[in-house]
Image: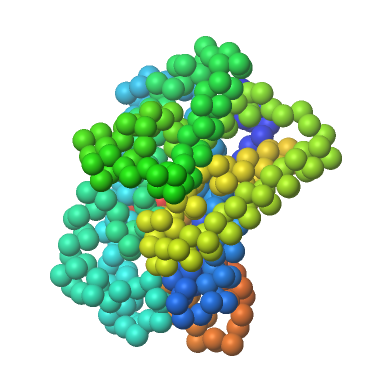
Amino acid sequence: MEIKKRESIGWIDLLRIIACFLVVLSHCCDPFVAQFETDRNSFLTGVSIGSLVRCCVPLFVMMTGVLLFPVRIGMLDFYKKRIGRIVVPLIFWSIVLPILFFIYLNFINPSTANPSIMMDGYTLKATLSKLYTFIFNFNFDTIPLWYLYMLIGLYLVIPILGVWLQQATKKEIKLFLFVWGISLVLPYLKMAAPFLGYTGNFGNMGLLGICDWNDYGTFYYVSGFIGYLVLAYYLVKHPISWSWKKTLSITIPMFLIGFLITFLGFIQTQKYFPGNYANLEIVWYFAGINVFMMTFPVFVIVQKIKVPSSARLSRVASLTFGVYLCHFVFVQVAYDLFEMVHSLPAFVRIIGMACSSFLISYLIVRAMACFKLTRRFIA
């Protein structure tokens, strides 16, 4: 396993950069998706690109599975090393991002055209509240940091999962992935159940044991991002030996079908639940079967590419986590800048926003990496 990791570091670095850019690109789509009532073309462009890049976060999780399994240190040491490394950036950016948003929206551009921004959330009182309530959860200014809360949860279970993976047979891992695969269709079952006459349990529309006094249904413990961790471990330990022709003939149609389900599903859901993001997000769930159908092909194709190890590639890849942490505020700034040239097609504006936000974030993170004091804020 360790030998394979050393041989494959090139493709892992490439995948980190791709996944990071896709995250930035996905956030650049949000202001356009929010225009469902005012600009249909912008809305459709935002939904199409946003649907296309939904594999971004699962790819990050799969890279975690590749790099951290098998676990070679004790549980306590693992927690100190991994969770300790996450907590400092989480606290730092949970404070800095709201401050940056406050400064930008009150002193630089208080007349932002971004439909996602609600100005009553950027008063001094509201901003001060955000500086300590992050201990409960992220807020709009720190949306990308939801991943860190989730990642800490994965870190808590990885040493336990690692013990099982070391002694599990190929057949047993495949069985777990099959069960996890069933959980990927549950969001759609939940959507379909009311049409089949299901009225919920005392008003709660949860399935398979979920109710007001229990959030943990049948598939709770084998669902979500944990499956991507195991899948990545499996694909590295038992790499697929398909030819390029067979690989592309399977993965490309698989990706396209997953994309069409995601894109058309979002459009159709918007038709019946306009502006209801609780319902709309179901189609965009990272742990949904359609997003899996886009994630698997990207991972397998990049894994198959013979990417040579490169100091420059590794240097860029090492800064992607920092880019992820800080990019969101620059997405908002980029939206306003490109909005000034409203004659540009929405597609061009979204791509321009993503490239400029990624580049600015990269330059800032690269500068922070030069100093010991700021280096720990970008992990």
Residue 24 seen by the camera: no
Residue 219 seen by the camera: yes
Colour convention:
rainbow
- Location of residue 143 (image quadrant): bottom left
| Residue 300, image x, y percentages | 68, 38
Residue furthest left as drawn: 125
| Residue 59, image x, y percentages | 55, 44
Residue depicted at x 58% and y 59%: 263
| Residue 99, image x, y percentages | 27, 67
Quick one: quadrant of the N terminus?
Answer: top right
Q: Is residue 158 left or right of residue 9?
A: left
Residue depicted at x 63% and y 28%: 236
Residue depicted at x 63% and y 55%: 260
In this rendering, the answer to whether 148 lies above or below 121 is above
Q: Nearer the viewer, residue 102 or 360?
A: 102
Residue furthest front as drawn: 197
Q: Is residue 294 left or right of residue 157?
A: right
In this rendering, the answer to whether 74 lies above or below 347 is above
Q: Is residue 374 left or right of residue 250?
A: left
| Residue 310, image x, y percentages | 67, 45
